[in-house]
Image (spheres, rainbow, N blue to C red):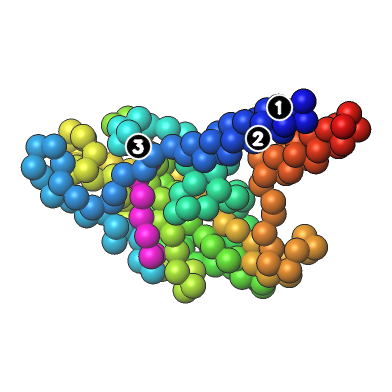
Amino acid sequence: MFHKKLVKASAVCAILFATQGAYAAVESCSGTTPGGATYDISGKVSNSTNCAILSPINANDNDNLGLINTTAFFGISDWQFGGKYDNLDPSGGDDLSALFDFTGDSMSGTYAYVGGTPLPSDVMLVFKDGANTNLVAYLLNSTLSGTYASPFTNPPFPLGQPSVKDISHISVYYRPGEDDGSGDPTGNVPEPATLALVGLGLLGIGKMRRKS
């Protein structure tokens, strides 16, 4: 009986691990379209180390913390939201991020970290537009300042005219650095799914010990 319950608990744990690892897909920021056109939008944000486009490339998803962490951009699934720069106004958007100052408009501009210390351990900027595009994310290097230009070009996106579209907004996502006051010197926060898995395991072991 004990063996059967142990096998059942292991199966539940395996399902939880599989669910936690089921991330959404991303596409490369450089390559060749099915029609044979080459593209490279990885350099649209200076001082970035990586770039990814949410798949499918023309799905026009809205960015939110749940989607960002489910996708696990750049292998990270515990991002925190740090505000956004709204570029709907062509003369310059509203800076709603406490971590960064942005200048410019819906086509190009600058960004600079102003959040103080400790510095975040990871930062990415996520660009949003409209129809026939999808989210484009850039992982920043330690400089945390530079320039940006609209990544919404044809190719890779199936746009008509003009061949470069405005940025709707830029969202900031980050992971806290060391000594962020969380009680963890690394600034890392356990993922809810991980905590649930640990709790389930402890509960199962307790029940099996009482009945054995």
Tell me the kind of residue under disc 3: Ser
Q: In this view, does 161 lie above or below 84?
A: above
Nearer the viewer's eye, disc 3 or disc 1? 1
Q: In this view, does 59 lie above or below 183?
A: above
The residue identified by callout 3 is 55
Q: Does residue 37 show up magenta in the picture?
A: no
Q: Residue furthest left?
A: 36
Tell me the kind of residue under disc 1: Lys
Q: In this view, does 16 lie to the left or right of 2?
A: left
Q: Residue 10 has which mark?
A: 2
The foreground one among 205 and 123 is: 205
Q: Which of marks 3 and 1 is nearer the N terminus?
A: 1
Tell me the kind of residue under disc 2: Ser
Q: Is the magenta stretch mostly helix, strand or loop?
A: strand
Q: Earlier in the sequence, mark 2 or mark 1?
A: 1
Please provide the residue range marked out in magenta.
48-55
The residue identified by callout 1 is 4
Please identify the quarter of the rendering in which residue 11 is found.
top right
Q: Where is residue 24 in the image (x, y as percent from the top left)?
A: 44, 37
